[in-house]
Amino acid sequence: MRSPADMDIVQIDISTKCHLKCSNCTRLIPHQTQRADMELETFERAVQSMEGWNGPNKLIGIIAGEPTLHANFEQISLRFAELWGGDNTNNGKFPIKDFNDFANQRLFDRSNGRGLWTSLGAGFYRNYETIMSVYSHFNTNTHESAGQHQALLITRADYIAATGISELQWEQNRDNCWVQKLWSATINDKGAYFCEVAGAIDRLYFNGKHAWPVEHGWWQRQPGDFGDQIELCNYCALAQPGPSQLDILERDIISPQHRDILRKLGSPAIKKHNYEIFDGELHKQKREVESRDNYVGDGGQGRRVGIG
């Protein structure tokens, strides 16, 4: 594992609203019982807590279910530009011949240190001019390219029982988790976390019980300082070689323990029986992630612009 201080992206998770219900969503969108937006004051505190972390090629990202559906997305974006990073951009101010090509260019532009993770949709186009001005980087993924999302809602106990993996191997895999190694720490409306998936699990399952206070320098914690947040890994299988599901199927692969927890929480997907129970024999596909990808079809050539 690594310290958030060593990461090049830290995400601020501003909403549980989304127009999609992708399979195995890392924000657990199909299981959210209510939709909530981060308050502006909470967002400001989150950005201010990152003072001193910034550096060349580093990026604070705005993410959510779909962040552009936040009721005050424009206000949050403009405040973001005041609090963090470089000048606003001229993105999109000139004719765009191919939006797919334009969006791919934005994937590699971190010039002002502000990023947006979006699935496009009505919120993106409604806030188009603000997005073009505020964010040098945006990572657009319509989830229309039949990408694979790895199953995460398999508890430690259920995974070991289904696969026969040893406790020692499970822990070794956890400590070398590709999500924490390649992606980011996060801040949501409950607090700060060493891992973005851990933050989503804690928010839904434990109402933020394991969150760190969002205070200056929280990101300087080293792996030895992660404390009881490591317990959240017991609810996640992303560090283990495991099965994936097409995102457009809108159906999670989950383990029995997760099913029982989510049923008690009132998960809409569980109520609709819209899930598959993890079976080590049935779900044989193995996925091992070695490098960061953008989940947009083979070789990153998938569409980055919606039908609309």
Image (tube, rainbow, N blue to C red):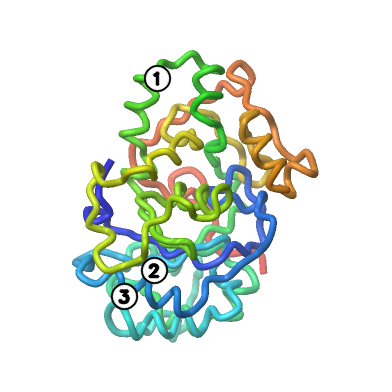
Sequence-wise first label, 1 or 3: 3
Type of the residue with mark 3: Gln
Q: Say few, some or many: other residues with alpha carbon within 10 Å of mark 3 (under 14 / 14 to 19 / 20 or more).
A: some
Q: Verify CB contact (< 8 Å) between mark 2 and mark 3.
A: no
Residue 241 location (% of width, % of height): 45, 27
Location of the C terminus (image quadrant): bottom right
> In what element is the residue under mark 1?
helix
Residue at mark 1 to residue at mark 3: CA–CA distance: 40 Å
| Residue 226 circle label | none
**Closer to us: 50 or 225:** 225
| Residue 115 circle label | 2
Which residue is pictured at 74% across the width and 49% down the height?
268
| Residue 167 circle label | 1
Location of the N terminus (image quadrant): top left
Q: Say few, some or many: other residues with alpha carbon within 10 Å of mark 2 (under 14 / 14 to 19 / 20 or more).
A: many
Which residue is pictured at 63% across the width and 21% down the height?
279
> In what element is the residue under mark 2?
strand
Residue at mark 2 to residue at mark 3: CA–CA distance: 16 Å
| Residue 48 circle label | 3
Q: Is residue 96 above or below residue 4?
A: below
Q: Is residue 59 visible?
A: yes
Type of the residue with mark 2: Gly
Type of the residue with mark 1: Glu
